[in-house]
Each structure stands twice: as C-alpha cells, then as structure tokens.
Image (cartoon, helix red, strand yellow):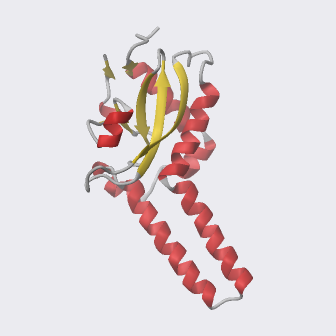
Amino acid sequence: MANPYTLTREMADKIVAAVRSDAECKKLLPGTTAFRFFAPIGHAGTARNFTNAFLISVAQIKGRFQSEAVGRRTVNDRTDEGDAEACTGVATATARVLNKLAGQPGFEFLLGAGPQDRLPSDPMNDFHTATQVTVTPGKAYVFDWHATLSLDCPLIFPSPTAFKAGRPVVRYTHFWGWT
C-alpha cells in the first residue's frame, strides 16, 4: 500500500486512469483538439471557453434574424455545450467519476473529490475551477484537466492553497510523487 500521507505516482496513475476511462470525460476532453496548442501555458481550456463564448454570441446575433423559438433554441444549445466544457463542467465530471470510486478496491486511499475554485489574487491568474482530490488521511491535492484539455496530462497542484496561488504545479507526465 502507498504511503497514506503523500500522493504517490501510483495513486495519481489510478486517478488519471479513472478519469481517462469515463465516457463523459472523454467527450469533454477529446483526444484531438487544436486548443491544446495553449496547454504548455495552462490555458487550453481558456482558449476553448473564448471560442464557445464567441459562438454563443454569433448564435445570439443569428437568432435575432430568425423566429424567436429557433433563435432561443440555437443559443441554449450553444450555452449548454459551453457550460459543460467550461472548467466548472470538467471539474464536476471528473469529481463525479472519482467519488464513485472512493473507498472501492484499489481506491482505498481516495476519500473524495469536488470542485475547487480559484479567485484571482493577482492579474496573472484567472477565475478558475479544478478538481480537488482528498486522500487518506485528509490531504488534498488539485488536479486540473481543463488547463490542458488532456485526459492523459492534467496539471497537479500540491494543495488547494498552491492552486489558488497558481503555483507550484507539475504536469502529470512529470509527476513522480510528493513525500
């Protein structure tokens, strides 16, 4: 069994594999997307949010020239998609997957998961939500799939405080555990 006071690579592997295998998460975080161009700076999801907001605006303008019912449906369709694909939607979906597995065989270390919000304390950080993962004996870490839009490579923060500050952070592919 892994050291219960740290997040080991084995634990992170199980967390990432669980999210990677979920159908809803696969839909929200597709294997191929042009937005990953912004992943190295942690803003792949931000780029997708801006695109969704632009498309919603176009749908609203288009809706003004259509019947009211058709226009409202077009805007609502785009808005629903944008909400699910936003950081809050990704955090909710990933937390749902992890909460189903908490305490199950192989996931005895996992106590639960939920959204973790960040309000910017400096201009370099934005309003953002990621997934707080709590492991035995109550230590919390933050996994951010929205920043990279990658099922295989979320950012990992050593605590909610670090997430709120925007650092330190490590990519899952470079993560070997915290002791």
Q: Is residue 81 above or below residue 11?
A: below
Q: Position of residue 22 (x, y in %)?
A: 60, 39
Residue under the image location 45 percent in, 47 percent down: 129
Relative depth, front residue between 90 and 125: 125
Q: Is residue 109 above or below residue 112?
A: above
Residue under the image location 56 percent in, 15 percent down: 108
Left or right of 135? Residue 64 is right
Left or right of 11? Residue 68 is right
Q: Position of residue 127 (x, y in %)?
A: 39, 53
Residue under the image location 44 percent in, 57 percent down: 33
Relative depth, front residue between 66 and 23: 66
Q: Is residue 17 visible?
A: yes
Q: Is residue 66 above or below residue 165?
A: below
Which residue appears farthest toward the right when viewing the image?
Answer: 69
Q: How many marks do you count on the picture?
A: 0
Q: Is residue 139 above or below residue 113?
A: above
Q: Position of residue 16 (x, y in %)?
A: 48, 32
Q: Position of residue 11 (x, y in %)?
A: 45, 21
Which residue appears farthest toward the bottom when viewing the image?
Answer: 65
Residue under the image location 47 percent in, 15 percent down: 137
